Image (cartoon, rainbow, N blue to C red):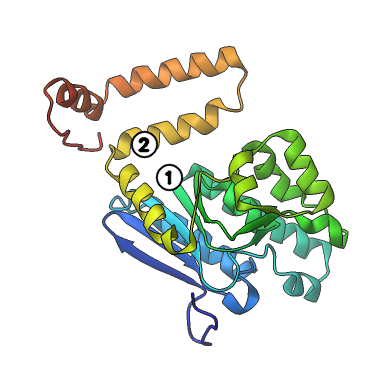
Amino acid sequence: MIATLEPDEPILLRDDRDGIATLTMNRPAARNALSAALMSSLEDAFEAIAKDAGVKVVILAANGSAFCAGHDLKEMRANPERQNYEVLFTQCSRLMMAITRLSRPVIAKVHATATAAGCQLIATCDLAVTSDNARFATPGVNIGLFCSTPMVALSRAIGRKPAMEMLLTGTAVDAAEALRLGLVNRVVAPDALDGATWDLAVAIAAKSPLTVATGKEAFYRQIELDLDAAYAYASKVMTSNMMAHDAAEGIDAFLEKRPPKWEGR
């Protein structure tokens, strides 16, 4: 991992290969704290990806000794006005919603510690693969600032009582516990992280882009509905999905025992 950042080096890197866009947060000296500039760069990147039909999956990674240390506290305290805080937290919430609303799956590749809004990022991403030496925490309570916005994503990713314990104590959980709680999908050795994340992204990228986009949107919409409404909504989604070319092609390919040819329609 890169340990230092040259003055002219971008704070967010993008690399595209085989339909997979890797976004790498690149503020290693600041432990990838979410400054206003980094959040703006991430927002811009997700907006560009949303318009890029060539991208099927996104990997969110980071350089340095930490995945993300949360908000940039030095930047926050440099301008301690209420309006500044309102703008900052609104921007953060907008970034998290951009990830959720993006039609492509976003996989967090977590090589090291993620705290506060960094933990929120991981909880917000659709999937997460982590190194077994990573740790996760929402420690705002320790400095008098409850992790209220991270709470939104965390409480939707794991159970209420584990979320409350993390939020109320600020205590970090290790990768194995994060897996048990459902915060991450896979835990691997550090030297296996790149391969495991890439293999997961490749597996998803091989699916119909239309089907994946349909499924991601439906997942987040139905999960906030009551059971009756969720089934009613999901039934309509499946009916529309069945009318798509890729569904017909996929079913025919299965019946004919041949690989499908996705057209994204």
Answer whether residue 91 is visible to the viewer in this image: no
Instruction: Give the label on residue 105, or none.
Output: 1
The structure residue drawn at horizontal position 49% and vertical position 30%, both measured from the top left corner, is 219
**Closer-to-camera residue (3/156):** 3
Residue 244 location (% of width, % of height): 26, 26
Answer whether labels 2 and 1 touch (C-beta < 8 Å): yes
- Residue at far right of view: 144
Q: Is residue 68 above or below residue 205?
A: below
Q: Is residue 146 above or below residue 153?
A: below
**For this view, does 145 lie left or right of residue 33?**
right
Q: Is residue 189 above or below residue 249?
A: below
Give the spatial CA distance, label 2 vs label 1. 8 Å
Q: Which residue is mark 2?
A: 212
Comes first in the chain, label 2 or label 1:
1
**Closer-to-camera residue (139/238):** 139
The structure residue drawn at horizontal position 51% and vertical position 71%, both measured from the top left corner, is 63
Q: Quadrant of the C terminus?
A: top left
Residue 37 location (% of width, % of height): 59, 70
Instruction: Give the label on residue 184, or none.
Output: none
Amino acid type indicated by mark 2: Val
Amino acid type indicated by mark 1: Pro
The crowd level at tag 1 (other Cα within 10 Å; few <14, some 14-19, many 20+) is many
**Closer-to-camera residue (32/233):** 32
